Image (cartoon, grey):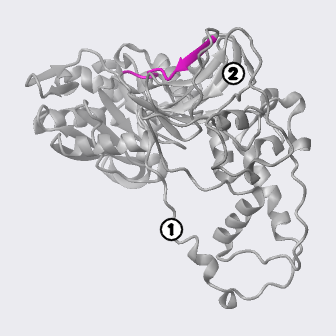
Amino acid sequence: MTTMTEASVREFKMPDVGEGLTEAEILKWYVQPGDTVTDGQVVCEVETAKAAVELPIPYDGVVRDLHFPEGTTVDVGTAIIAVDVAGGSAPPAPAATQPAAAQPAAAAPAEEPKAAGSGRQPVLVGYGVATSSTRRRPRKGPEVPVQQASTAIQTELNGHAPPAPAAPAPAAPAPAAAAAPAGGERPLAKPPVRKLAKDLGVDLTTVVPTGPDGIITREDVHAAVAAAVPAASEPQVAPAPAAVQAPASYDTTRETRIPVKGVRKATAAAMVGSAFTAPHVTEFVTVDVTRTMKLVEELKADKEFAGLRVNPLLLIAKALLVAIRRHPDVNASWDEAAQEIVVKHYVNLGIAAATPRGLIVPNIKDAHAKTLPQLAESLGELVATARDGKTSPAAMQGGTVTITNVGVFGVDTGTPILNPGESAILAVGAIKPQPWVHKGKVKPRQVTTLALSFDHRLVDGELGSKVLADVAAILEQPKRLITWA
């Protein structure tokens, strides 16, 4: 790593993008040495234990050095990029007479890594040597080209690899010049889409965007993979039966190793800590929610809810909030150091959301004070933000109780684990028609199973049972939302 001594060079340090975070992993650099940057421009995307965050540069200038490559975990407060705020030119580009791979590494001087990387070569994603304040995590293997990704998809679907071409064809020239956007502009895509493309080995510069303002969508990436499937299997010859094909191709796909990091690492640590710290108790109740489902349909037609997300989860959330109002002691936390139970006079309602980055639990701040339309609006924003991978660390902190909707996966119920610092979590099972005794007769009714896990240190069986019974009673008779609220 080159040390910048010029007075005009500013070092941008890894900030604490959450509350009390100590490190973050550099997922993607959006600039390279020699690029001109402006105040507020996003220069990289980093992943913390809580969320993926884009970092803007706080000044104008020319990028002089990227201190760490993608995939490096960097401590908060460590300089990650150097910018010449005087607008000086980038370091001179290396001579193009000899490929970098052909130059002996041992003969390179100490300053060679920077010189070799200053010429916008796409094969280099970072420059310099990591200092002792960082640690390099294991990198994934080289990205798989689109055709290889398509071959892997065919193998998984058909149970065997597609037949090889009759004769090897000469390698096509690299399409970098033709595929690059005009003027060297970077393709427009959201971080989750970029990650998907990276995982599938898709070069975003070759993808045709269909989103607004030329933004590449997830569907565009999948379309690029699908379009390469015919190319991967041409020319077609009569395939040999699967039984006589060599089994060697199966050996390379018997196992996949996925590094545990980011959100998944933080979730695992939190769940282990919660499971072995708080004594969990889970209670269940099966309830007829036919009237609730009818109310959902009525609210969808109500002009006051026009444009809002109205679904059973909305009424379940409201039912839980009413139950907490009737039994406020359930909304608490255990302070081990002070040996106190801390009762919260507000409800930050967590909603578990499955995203491409793993399970996250953002929460609706002060959900107890929101009207039903306001709660619907907040739920819609929470879900949309989570799906786009834009959930901020602050949105996942300070939760008091949580709802996890396992029913969307067709699951009847579960025994959810508490989020650290919370006293209760409600699992909602699948809502489906079942035979039910209604007014003395067996009829098909919309039925679901609720499961409430709670911390038995501060919520005893009586309190937990009352809360769960109240939620069930409201969902069975939604008019209680008016009489009990």
Residue 364: within the magenta? no
Secondary-structure class at tag 2: strand
- For badge 2, the amino acid type reads Val
Q: Where residue 333 sits: x, y (%)?
A: 19, 26
Q: What label sits on residue 255 in the rendered view?
A: 1
- Residues drawn in magenta: 9-19
Q: Which mark is residue 333?
A: none
Report, in whole angstroms, how far the alpha carbon at label 1 lies from the one at label 2: 41 Å
Quadrant, the N terminus: top right
For label 2, the residue is 63
Task: Specify which label sits upstream in the sequence, 1 or 2.
Answer: 2
Residue drawn at point x = 81 percent, y = 66 percent: 232
Residue 308 visible to the viewer: no
Side (left or right) of 183 relative to 33: right
Q: Is residue 158 visible?
A: yes
The answer to whether residue 285 is left or right of residue 13 is: left
The location of residue 102, given as percent across then percent down, is 76, 53
